Image (cartoon, helix red, strand yellow):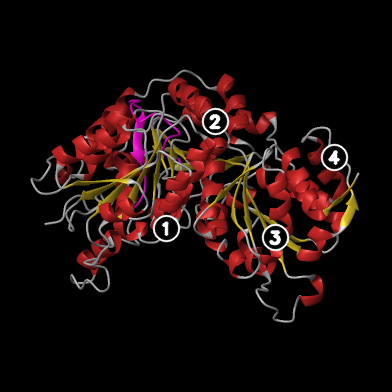
Amino acid sequence: MKISGSRVVIECLVEQGVDTIFGYPGGAILNVYDELYKNQDRIRHILTAHEQGAAHAADGYARSTGKVGVVFATSGPGATNLVTGIATAYMDSSPIVAITCNVATSLLGKDSFQEIDITGVTMPITKHNFMVRNVEELASVIRQAFVIAKSGRPGPVLIDIPKEVTANMVEFEPLKNPDEAVDLVRQDSTSLRRALTTPVPSDDEVKKAADIINNAKRPVIYAGGGIIISNAAKELMDFATIADIPVSESMMGRSAFPSSNSLNLGMVGMHGTKASNMAVTESDLVLALGARFSDRVISDASRFAANSQVFHIDIDPAEINKNIPVAGSLVGNVKDVLSRLLPLIKKADHSEWKAQIAEWKKSYPKMYDDNPADSINPKFMCECIHKVAGDDAFITTEVGEHQLWTAQHYPFEKPRTFVTSGGLGTMGFGTGAAIGIQIANPKARVVHIAGDGSFRMNCNELATISHYNLPVVIVVVNNGTLGNVRLWQRVFYGERYSATTLDFGPDWVKLAGAYGIDGYRANNADEFASVFEKAFKSGKAAVIDAKVDIDVPVLPMVPGGKAIYNQIMDLQ
């Protein structure tokens, strides 16, 4: 059948199983939006308040489901407003496809109105990007984009389409099923064919890895986001249980292993637990699973697990020996590799090692023990939210102290229930992500824990939450400061609090009301427990202004450049 380029876009998205698009229209992409209007019974469009919110929503959709998230934007500023969202997805290996439309090809390179070279802009922060200048190529490009986004180590792909390409007519042949797209991509491109091939370790390599693991006396698992991305939580549980190995998690790995399990050591790194950091330091084997050895984890690389063997399992060969030299590695899908290792792993008992770890677990900052009379203890806040919301609720955050408190203290039990910006550290990520998660999981509940600094960057998305009647509960951790930066100013900059105090509006309760959303205020623990339960059980959107003291620090803390065992446990 002969159809327009804009219709090709819609038909290819339907082929790929897309049911929701997040976006914001504009002149260059009008043809596609017109076609979307005609097909609104097949694909739902969520209009956000800003393109960046749409990108984060597509990202949240992807992280919570494992499916590819899709975002639309127009040319020029519409496209550039996606950049932070695309970079966020890239750093955290989240599969999204961003479709932008540009000015007509005759106007490209002439500084035309709302023209931007968005493929050039996004080249460093996408797995791949395309400029489609010929309508005959359009279907193939869209199919390639989805295959690339979700294959291997997932990530974002951008497609830019000049306006006349969306209007031109072309003969279109639909696929019988989405899997055909993989075969077509493999046929179309030798370079992409190589990129789509997931390495598979040999039996001999897997056997040697098993021998190393079986001979370890003080092993520790360093679990990263790859466990969640590859749906390997069950394999990790089986592996850790049989091998009797404690599990440390990166921030992106939080929720990969149940917090209630005695083998869970919590987060490792700059704000990791004493038990986690010391276990890595004193181990004789660090088994890294789907983790990338971020600087926030390793700090001083020369002293990270300095007396230990490091064995790395990851799907991306570029991560091996990138930040930490390793004694051995297996390159492949971590779920598949663990499945092959399991039959070779001997049932172990590391009681003496775990007894030492139990002693380290007793050491934590005393500041989290009590609730003050005129503010809320962050640890209590996390535990209170979990008590009401339960194990199945999705928790999103922005970036800052509230994010770290959540990663430290929220008792995650199920994979994919914690969604945050780890690699890029994007303030403004969480509200859009919460929208995407709630749209993707309409029967679930989403609680968004936001800092008052971050929430200023995206509170316009309250309009989206209100319009679509999304029952997202937003807890604004209101400590009147850019807390993480203030902490560094307090410890390392002589208490010179330059441009970090937020002693000016808005009133979050009144702002919520302006959008038709229920607002609550909580000044202490009792008030927070009461209003959170009321807000959550109302089944409606809500904003809770939760007061936290300006000088409550995130501890433990490793000063920049120090070894991870050099932790600040208390501030005098």
Which region of the structure is painted magenta?
Answer: 253-271
Q: Are marks 1 and 3 in contact (CB under 8 Å)?
A: no
Query: Which is more N-terminal, label 4 or label 1?
Result: 4
Does residue 10 belong to the magenta stretch? no
Q: Are marks 1 and 4 in contact (CB under 8 Å)?
A: no
The amino acid beneath tag 3 is: Leu
Tell me the mark number nearer the camera, choosing from 2 and 3.
3
Specify whether 570 is left or right of 116: left
Specify whether 99 is left or right of 260: right
SS state under label 3 = helix
Q: Which mark is residue 232?
A: 2
Query: Which is more N-terminal, label 3 or label 1?
Result: 3
Up the image or down, 372 lies above or below 240; here it is below
Up the image or down, 317 lies above or below 259; here it is below
Tell me the mark number nearer the camera, choosing from 1 and 4.
1
Circle 3 residue: 30
Circle 4 residue: 174
- Locate the C terminus and report the quarter of the image it occupies: bottom left
**Distance between mark 3 and mark 4 Cα atoms:** 23 Å
The amino acid beneath tag 4 is: Pro
**Distance between mark 1 and mark 3 Cα atoms:** 24 Å
Query: Which is more N-terminal, label 4 or label 3?
Result: 3
**Which residue shows up at 39% across the image and 41% down it?**
472
Q: Are marks 2 and 4 in contact (CB under 8 Å)?
A: no
Circle 1 residue: 460
